[in-house]
Amino acid sequence: MIQAIDLTKRYEDGLLALDHLNISILPGQIYCLLGANGAGKTTTINLFFNFIEPTSGTALLNGKDCTKEPLLAKQFAAYVSENVMLYGNFTARQNLDFFTKLSGRKNLSKDEYYMVMRQVGLPERAFEQRVKTFSKGMRQKLGIAIAILKQAPALLLDEPTSGLDPKAGAEFVELLLKLRGEGKAILMSTHDVFRAKEIADVVGIMKEGVLIMEKTKDDLKYEDLEKLYLKYMEVS
Amino acid sequence: MLWTVVKRELLDHLFSLRFSAIFVLTLILMLTSVLVFSARYARQQREYPKRVEAFVDEQGTVNLYSIACNSGATVREVPSPLGFLFAAGERELPDQSVMALHGLNTLWRSTEPGDIMDSSSGTDWTYVVTVLLSFGAGLLTYKSISGERRDGTLTLVLANPVSRATILLGKYLAALLALGTVFIASVLAGVILLEVLGTAQLGGDDWIKLGLFVLLSMIFLSAFVFAGLLCSVFTRGPVLSAVAFLFAWMTLVFVIPNLGGILAGLNGKAQTPLQVRMAAKEIPDRYTLTPAMSGEKVASTMLERESAREQLLLSYFRSLVAQVDLGRNLTRVSPASAFSFAAERIVGGGTFRLTRFVDNAVRYRQGMFQAVIEADKRDPKSQHRYVPYWCGGDHFSALTVDLGPAKEFHDTLPSAKEGFAAAFWDLFLLLMYTIIAFAVAFWRFARQDVAPAPGT
Amino acid sequence: MIGHIVRKELLVNLQSMRFLVGLVVSALMMGIVGYVLVEDYATRMQKYIADVAEHRAALAETKVYSMVAVDVDIPPSPLSVFSRGSQNLPTTLHVSPFHVPSLIDEGGASASIGLNGTSSHADNPLLRMFSSIDLGFVISTILSLFAVLLVFDSFSGEREQGTLKLLLTSSAGRVHLLAGKYVGALVTLAIPLTVGFLEVMILWALHPSLSFDAQVWAGVGLVYCASLLFLSSFLAMALFLSLYATESSSCLMYLLLAWVTVSVVIPAGGGYVAEYFRPKGLREIMLSEAKQASAHLSNELERLNYRQKGGWNNAWTDWFGAESILGLTQQEANNRLAYNQKVVPMKLQYAEDRYRVVESYAQGLLSWSRTREDLIRPSLCVDYGNVVQALAGTDLNTFDDLVQKSRLYRDAMMAYLRPKSETSLWFTRIFEYPDMEPTEKNQQYWQSLIEKEGQRAVEKIMSWDRVSSLDLTSMPPPSVNMRGVTERALHALPDGILLFAASVVFIGLSMIRVRHYPLN
């Protein structure tokens, strides 16, 4: 469902952000990308949405090339960024309505929007409130709601839990597991080793644009991910 | 999909302060210009002469005997009921022609006591569109891409299966619709005010002209909307976009159009008054009179002289217009100039209208001359020798006759169709600017990294 | 402390992209406009010199006293580079026994296209349809925009960066910060301004035919100070408004709207509105009174049976004005003299009457035009435009002053001419040229000439060209001079004070407001 083949991105200033990345995520799988700031996690996700163009290699969503057929490919993936930004002058529902329509789904009723907002844990009073009054956590939740409403088979989440309080974080994990149960392929970048261990089917560790380790859940049963992570970070 | 984007943008615009501010300012300026126009138009209408005084007497008849000596007949431009659309520079142009039956003498504008106190800044809708609404186009678009990129909403939008062209087009349409709302609402208010005041009666052709003007304005504004988008696409943040747009706007709206007169002045191709005076002095040498000439020959030679003088005047006039047009050609690189030239033509103003007036004046003179000759032929007492400036004797009929329709001067304004045809190239240019701006903006936006590079 | 902040602001400003772009644009613009207007001034100066020579020659050619007419040419102002003034203002004031110069009765430079153009016509009258811009316009639109761009984010920007809090943790107070930003921006703005002025001076220095005296340089200095004052008031206004917005980009937008209102909407809209309130009926009254006066005179002339009393056919005459006659017999000349004793005072009176009618209309218009000016005074750009126009001497007031001076000059001239109107030198000179008098003997002589040499020979004898010119050395010379620089400065003072007051008020308000500027 989500696949990167020799994906490489070198920025104009010469920075090699991503170096021959190969990953593959199947439906019903959660893939957690771990790594320090600047390891290339965000770049990877940006490449899938054609926000930036790859220097070489291909990013595929449901087998569609994200560079050559971006519009087709983007139908298959939803996106939550580290810092979800929305139209401040619009209410939560208006934002939801706009982005859902953009994703190609029309004619949703108010109640359907409310339902999803309830599902992500947004307080009732915020539904018709302008987004500029929202805290970061609330925006994050709304971002997740947008992603859910898109009903895409793949989810690409760029540190979605940053800024969420512990309770919301736990709710989010539950939501993710539920989505996995629905057969979605999920790529999530995170700093949070514990959470990764908790939910991931596959964990990848990135450093300076290179995927230096990839382990499945089964592998990790016998190893301490945290130690592993620190070890890889220390090397070189 | 496109409509979704347009709707969101439109909502954003309609509830913003900049929108209401532009609306209020536009409405104020457009309504006051209608008020001012209607006061002036009423005066012009009142004072417009009903007959050509020196030729036609109060009874509506023409004295053939004295008409040969009359060289002070004045015909005047009929005031345009659409003067509120285009008035800039109009008050600096000649608006009447002094003629004799055998030739036009001068084109001029009588300076009235008090003219020096008039500030002749363009009090018209064209000015409002070129200056204020084009500025509004920038205000509505300068941060449409760069702002969303800074705010981070752009990535969330583009994570959806919506092409960048759609986004750009959506933003364009929304800004144009918002501006169109402002403009068309103000136009309607202005037209209603005009009807209420009742001074100017618009005919069918005038409505077409007004419609064409609105259409033209929208094309012009769409060029500026794209200019704003262009600035937005090419810059890092909204502040830089605003600065970029301002400099572009300043150059296109103030700097380049104002260079027109200067450029025209530097291209000194027109005949100078002195050259013309010299050429006029040489005319009698080309058509010389000799004592041996018969009366008919003297008459025809003198007529030739006079028609040569008229030709000289007309060619002088055309060279002046050509110089103006040359100066303008160079300023056409700015859509603001192209727009005001097109508006001038569609509405029927400026040198376009003046040229038409001169044609009308010449046609009137010729028709009148023909009619006078015809009337003279019917008089058996006349020798049928029309000699300019020789009034008296029996060269020419001494009857006083009614010449019918020929005696009346009808100044027609260029029709909407003619105006449109004359404005065609400017319209084409405007469309080209729009397309180029769109193409460049799209080209740039399509291959742009919308997510910032790490570490920035 | 403030010095420290100013230095930092200055550094930040000077290194910014907007400063660079703004500097380039304004330098380019001022260079182009400066070049064009310096050239324009040089051309107008040439035309002025030619006109003066032409008019002087024409005066020196005068043959009879009734034809004495002094054309007072108004020299172009060298400072017109900064303010071009109205193109409609006439460049020549006509002073003659039969015409009293008045503010609005000098014809102006009308757009006339004909076959007998003279040097006093513009080369291409159609070019007047182009609006012309001057350095004052460039400063009041481009540099004021520049001012907006410099200060719109001075507080909101620091707040967004987070440096504002840091700054305020130091011992610098908010007011210090404000003062520092203001002075820093003003010094930054002074750079493009100075560059522009230097460009003009270089253009002047390089121009082969221009040289200026101390008065002009003092004027330039004053215009420079006025420009600084204007920029300072505009900056203060922008700074004050910027304190009401917390986000840079929206702040920029508010300021741009303010800018477009001040520099475009008020000047244009105020003009529109005033146009609507133009005094009605005044013009009709003026026209009918003028018609009445002229009808009265023509009736009187008709009553005195002008034609029969002599010499009508050979006269070059203007019904209400001057006349000069060739080919009078002594008898006819005597008749004329008696007739003139009645008629000339009437004609002179008519000139005065007409002047009074026109002048009262002019005063009505003038007071309306002052109202219009007051209507648009709330715009700083208009105030600045007024100051520069007054300093450059291209405003209506300076023109009015010249008209008044020329009127005074006419009084002096009339004191010299009035006694002459009772002599035959007023209208004819034939007595000095006995061969021109149509006596029987002369007529026989002319007949013989025609037979010998054709008509031309007689024409030559009978020509005014043969008549020597009057000696006018004892007539008071024209003394119509432009106001000096001090006087012009005095007239620019009220608007200058307005600008200064605006600066002070806006800075004061900003100082109050800055205390409450939210940090979060």
Image (cartoon, grey):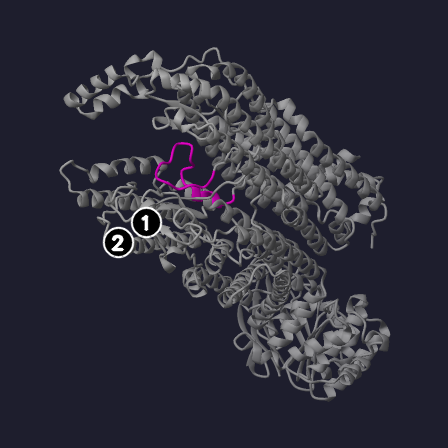
User: Do labels 2 and 1 touch, CB within 8 Å?
Assistant: yes
Q: Which residues are magenta?
A: C110-131
Rendering quarter of residue B11: bottom right
Task: Work out whether residue C482 or residue A54 is closer to the camera in this orientation and state it.
Answer: C482
Check chain identity for marks 2 and 1: say if they share one.
yes
Q: Is residue C413 left or right of residue A194?
A: left
Amino acid type assigned to the residue bearing label 2 in the image = Asp
Q: How would you rate the neighbour count of disc 2 (Cα within 10 Å): few for under 14, some for 14-19, many for 20 or more?
A: some
Name the residue carrying label 2: B379
Rendering quarter of residue C466: top left
Does the magenta run of residues contain C126? yes
Task: Work out whether residue B29 or residue B449 is closer to the camera in this orientation and state it.
Answer: B29
Q: Chain of mark 2?
A: B
Circle 1: element type: helix
* Residue B267 location (% of width, % of height): 38, 42
Residue drawn where x is 30% and y is 41% of the image = B389
Task: Work out whether residue A14 or residue C35 is closer to the camera in this orientation and state it.
Answer: C35
Residue C379 seen anywhere in this rendered image of the structure: no
Dot 2 or dot 1: first in sequence order is 1
Which quadrant, please, contains the N terminus of chain B? bottom right
* Residue B319 location (% of width, % of height): 35, 46
Magenta stretch secondary structure, dominant: loop
- Disc on res. B64: 1
Amino acid type assigned to the residue bearing label 1 in the image = Leu
